[in-house]
Amino acid sequence: MANWQNLLRRPSGNLKKNNILNTLHTFLITGLLLFAGSNTALAKDSLTGREIMEEVYQRHEQFPYIYEEQVMVLIDSSGNRDTRKLRRYSRLDSADSGRYLLLFDHPPEVRGVGLLTTIQPPENIQASIYLPAYGPQLIKSVGQNQADTFLGTDFSVSDLLPEPLGKYYFKRLQDERVGEVDYFILDMYGKQADTDNEPPLKRHYVRQDIYYITRTDSFDRHGRLHKRQTHHDMKPLGGSMWRADMVLMEDLKAKHQSLIKISRRVFSRDYVPEELFTLEWLVNNQHMPLPEKEAAPPDTSTGSHGEVNISQAMETTN
């Protein structure tokens, strides 16, 4: 019996070989994981500002048809609030052209006002506003420049659109870590700017984990901070796409704030037909929301229809 027990306790040659192979396999897997992690870090370190922005757009700006219902809260330097309800329609016709419409539904004094923007190659932005009181016409060129705001808000047209990448140079600065989140820091300049002697137009803070711009600082021509736009209440929408359900713009000079809260979002071609982006549609249908489709695709409704918490938005940065 003792001999049988000794035989059972003694590892066979095959067992020793298997143990060695398992150990080598474990070391190999661990080494590959460490190598992959170091390669990822090296890849991020080698990215240029332009490459980071291209990844941002590739992940988050590619869906061609988006309909949103929004609440906008405007706060002046005395703390007075003005609340507006609006709809936003986005339609990308190609990689470098698109159409956007902001249509105001409330309060009555701005009901039917529409802000229509088109982007055509080569990176030409045209913005027009429709004011029902002025009759069937579009008033050209409103709020296109960085400092030009529209309809009493703190937003310019360019603040609400993807930036034409070919029109700007993006200079990468030292990465920053805020709390538990790592950020790429990118300064944005005009294409022909002297980046060593001129201040940037904007500074983007890009989350490294999802390649999303959650903060943008805008500067005046003297390099002084003018406005700050921050994105809050981040939601994953499938794949690598994310969206913010709250966008806060602060005018630090005028001490004004404008907050956009997205209460509903639908990704569907049916909700963004081509005829929306015409003067004729604005004149005839500006008071009529799009009817619900019988077989409408499920929307990615986010947020709530309750009170907008501006204090929380100002305290949260990612």
Image: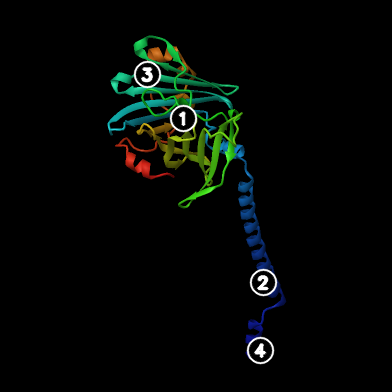
Q: Kindly identify which residue carries mark 3.
A: 113
Task: Kindly report the distance in space between the C-alpha atoms of the residues bearing marks 1 and 4.
Answer: 84 Å
> Which is more N-terminal, label 3 or label 4?
4
The residue located at (48%, 34%) in the rendering is: 219
Q: Which residue is mark 1?
A: 159
Q: Which mark is residue 313?
A: none
Which of labels 1 and 4 is toward the front? 1
Residue at the image position 34 percent from the left and 43 percent from the top: 312
Q: Nearer the viewer, residue 249 or 191?
A: 191
Visual colour scheme: rainbow
Label 2 or label 4, whichever lies nearer to me, is 2
First along the sequence among labels 1 and 3: 3
Q: Nearer the viewer, mark 3 or mark 2?
A: 3
Closer to the chain start, of discs 3 and 2, is 2
Q: Which residue is mark 2?
A: 19
Q: Are marks 2 and 1 in contact (CB under 8 Å)?
A: no
How far is disc 4 from disc 3 in space, using C-alphas? 96 Å
Query: SS of the residue at dot 4?
Result: helix
Q: Amino acid at mark 1?
A: Asp
Cα separation between marks 2 and 4? 24 Å
> Which residue is drawn at the image coordinates 53% and 43% (left, top)?
185
Q: Which mark is residue 3?
A: 4
Give the x, y percent position of residue 72. Answer: 35, 30
* Labelled pair 4, 3 in contact (Cβ < 8 Å): no
